[in-house]
Image (cartoon, helix red, strand yellow):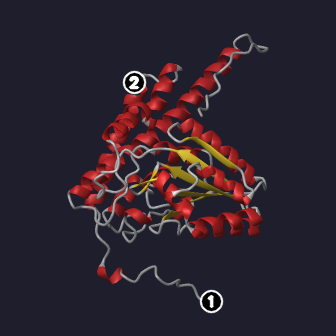
Amino acid sequence: MTTEMTKPTSEAGVNGNSGESMAALQHETDKKRNLEYYHQMLLIRRLEEKTAEAYTQGKIGGFLHLYIGEEAVAVGVVAATNPLDHLVTHYRDHGYAVAKGSDPGAIMAELYGKSTGVSKGRGGSMHLSDVSRHFWGGYAIVGGHLPLATGIAHSIKYQGKDEVVICVMGDGSTNIGMFHESLNMAALWKLPIIYLVENNLFGMGTSIKTHSSLTEIYQKARGYGMPGDKFDGMDILTVRDHVKTAVERARHGGGPSLLEAMTYRFRGHSMADPQLYRDKTEIEEWRTSRDPILLLANKMYERGVFTEEDTKQVEQQVEQQITAAVKFAEESPFPKPEELYDNIYVKENY
């Protein structure tokens, strides 16, 4: 399922050149917006590649789950929401932190376990968060964040706020109790929340055909009387438009939705994954024909929105950002031992 952008049209107005001016303005708007999408996806890709490099050098500890190949989902989701909307996600969370606007240096510092990280070096790869951007983090427990996201949505409705929650999960999360309980409560109370499944065809190393009796996950929405939608998760514009429809419905009292973005990770489940369960030709086929970054660039080239010089400039900017992020992480200090118990208890007096 592919969403095509509306092409600029020239309409004659009172001034004979007004139609051309409007078309030129629309063209520049499209160019600016789509270059930003390209920039964000490329920034995610390069940051992930650098984290993989640092991990192999022993500079990043714990687990590391890369988002390479799935960049269009994170960028499309954030493009469809407002800054005050809330985002709760799984532990493959680096891409969402970038898309939400967190500083790449602070993200990299967090992966290094440094005190300048977004979670002050206490969360690491699987627990990124940025309160100032309503990004409530990645969570290491599969599906454990669904009740929390549902609770945020309940709070929003209770307080009458004009906000929406996006709760992102993998396909493996849809077979556990917390998934069903959360969707049931959200539908019962018509909460302003979108449950978004990134279906990359594997729950860790297990094919969806093996772990789920219903392989079209969006149809699970029927059990709770909520809308379900399935779309191409490799096309940034398609993701943005489908998510926006669900977000606006939730924002205006229409209740929750279950969305299924069909995507694919180009790397293993984690850095410890030898990928023995996937055919190498399958991975290469996705890389060559469905890379979300190349898909956007080629589409914009064909429409005359991008030039090669445009994308080269973005690539240079991204390289500068990544170089600066790594330098920041390398030079930042580790948390001090005496800070070990900071941020555990609320210091306010009641």
Image quarter of residue 8: top right
Q: Which residue is drawn at 31% across and 47% down?
A: 49
**Mark 2 neighbour density, 10 Å: few (under 14) some (14–19) many (20 or more):** few
- Front residue of 209/337: it is 209
Q: What residue type is labelled 2?
A: Glu
**Where on the picture, by quarter, is residue 191?**
bottom right
**Label 1 crowd (10 A; few <14 / some 14-19 / many >=20):** few
- Give the image location of residue 282, x and y in percent: 37, 38
Residue 82 visible in this rendered orientation of the protein: no
Q: Is mark 1 on a helix, strand or loop?
A: loop
Q: In this view, does 202 lie to the left or right of 350?
A: left
Q: Which of marks 1 and 2 is nearer the N terminus?
A: 2
Seen at 60% across and 34% down, the residue is 1
Question: Which of the 4 image quadrants contains residue 341?
Answer: bottom left
**Disc sitting over residue 350 in the figure:** 1
**Where does the image place residue 328, in percent across and percent down from the top left?**
31, 56
Do tag 1 and tag 2 residues touch (Cβ < 8 Å)? no
Whether residue 250 is visible here, answered yes or no, is yes
Residue 194 placement, left or right of 269: right
Which sits in the foreground, 22 or 291? 291
- For label 2, the SS is helix
Task: Give, as a three-letter code, the residue at label 1.
Answer: Tyr
The residue at the far left in this view is 57
Residue under the point 44% across and 42% down = 41
On the image, numbered disc 2 is attached to which residue? 309
Residue 197 tag number: none
Residue that extends furthest to the bottom in the rendered view of this protein:
350
- Is 318 placed above or below 102 here? above
